[in-house]
Every structure is written in C-alpha cells, then in structure tokens.
Amino acid sequence: MDKFITLDGLVAPLDRANVDTDAIIPKQFLKSIKRSGFGPNAFDEWRYLDHGEPGQDCAKRARNPNFVLNQARYQGASILLARSNFGCGSSREHAPWALQDFGFRAIVAESFADIFFNNCFKNGLLPIVLPKTEVDALFGLTEHTPGYRLTIDLSAQRVLRPDGHAIPFEVDAFRKECLLNGWDDIGLTLRHAEKIREFEARRRIEQPWLFA
C-alpha cells in the first residue's frame, strides 16, 4: 500500500447524497478480486450511456456528457468531494478499489457509511469528514474555480485551501499511522516477519510430525 503523507490534488465535485456502493462499482463487475482494473467501470451507470459488462472496451463506449466526472476540467482529479452518507449500501470492498483505480487518493464528505469508511483505510484511500458548512463552501469554490485544488496534510490533520484557510479533521491514531507508513493488513503482519520465521523454525523442531 502506498504511503499517504500529503496530497496536493485537483478536486472533483460529486454533488449527491447517499451514493451507494452499487453506483460506485455495479455488481456485474465484482467477479475479480485483483484490486485493480476497476477504474474504467467506476460509476459505470452514470458515466456511460449503455449498459456496462465485464470485458468491454470502455474507450469505445458513449459517455454521458452530463455526468460531472466526464467533464474535461475534472480529468486527473485525485480528491473527490461528496455529500452525506457516501458509500452506503452493500459492503463490497471493490468500491474503494474502483475509486483508487480511477485516480482518487482522498474523499472529502459530510459523512460516510461505516463499512465503506473502514474499507477505505484498509486500502490506502483517505476518507475525510468535514462539517456541512465547510463542504458547502468547497462545492462552491470547486464549481466556480476551474482547476480548483486542495492540499491534504495527514500529519497535521488539515485540509488547506488555496486562500490559506485550513480546515482540521479527525482521524483515528492507528489508522493515521498505517496510512503514513503504507501499512495494510499484510504489511502490519510482515512487520513481525522475523518472529514468524523464528516460530516456524522452532515448531519444526518441537513438532516434527506436523511436517512429515
């Protein structure tokens, strides 16, 4: 998992509340567990004018010109701005995979669904909860300022606007440490690799019949 320390990124606004995980990555794309390749199908039913199926060449599909993430000014965005209860619905971990593969590193919203919120941290995607007044202001600034960017400083736990206004946010200390160091669940386990090897070597001596 990549480390998350600071991020200076273009902001894309998704001005919808209660965006569920089936909208983020529709169910027909859940067959793979590779964690990659889901970006072209993120928000599939909103981005394209046809019904998407696995294996399609998305470059040849007609796009919905009215969907915000298809607008040229938001291409390359790494920060998604959203409303309340983002990531509700089913618990599919493919949702943060799809958002990351699309290019997002952080999501700023009024609130998140609990399971989606937890899955983001496990996959290196930073979900930031801000007060509605701050989110409203960011939507206005993003929509009226082409190329609007934010700087997210995880160490300082703040979102910095270009005008110098800093917005603090809360984050669990353990989750913060994992993101700063790039530790997913496997990475946390491998921190104890030497102890694991010592245990296995000792077990071969003490319980040889297990390896016969």
Image (cartoon, helix red, strand yellow):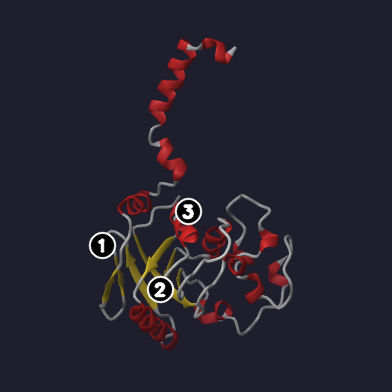
Mark 2 lies on residue: 110
> In the figure, 140 relative to 97: above or below?
below
Question: Separation of disc 1 and disc 3 at Cα?
Answer: 21 Å
* Residue visible at 49% across and 69% down in the picture: 86
Q: Earlier in the sequence, mark 2 or mark 3?
A: 2
Q: Earlier in the sequence, mark 1 or mark 2?
A: 2
* Residue visible at 43% across and 24% down in the picture: 197
Relative image position of residue 132 (x, y in whole percent)? 37, 78
Q: Which mark is residue 76?
A: none
Judge by depth and name the residue closer to the eye, 163 or 119. Answer: 119
Mark 3 lies on residue: 123
**Badge 3 element:** loop
Relative image position of residue 208 (x, y in whole percent)? 52, 11
Relative image position of residue 95 (x, y in whole percent)? 56, 61
| Quarter of the figure with residue 11 | bottom left
| Quarter of the figure with residue 102 | bottom right
Question: Mark 3 Cα within 10 Å, few/some/many (few <14, many 20+)?
Answer: many
Residue type at mark 3 is: Asn
Mark 1 lies on residue: 156
Question: Mark 1 Cα within 10 Å, few/some/many (few <14, many 20+)?
Answer: few
Q: Quadrant of the C terminus?
A: top right
Residue type at mark 2 is: Glu
Residues at discs 1 and 2 in contact (Cβ within 8 Å): no
Question: Separation of disc 1 and disc 2 at Cα?
Answer: 20 Å
> In the figure, 75 relative to 22: above or below?
below
Residue type at mark 1 is: Ala
> In the figure, 42 relative to 147: above or below?
above
Nearer the observer, disc 2 or disc 3? 2
**Badge 1 element:** loop
Q: Earlier in the sequence, mark 1 or mark 3?
A: 3
Q: Is residue 98 left or right of residue 6?
A: right
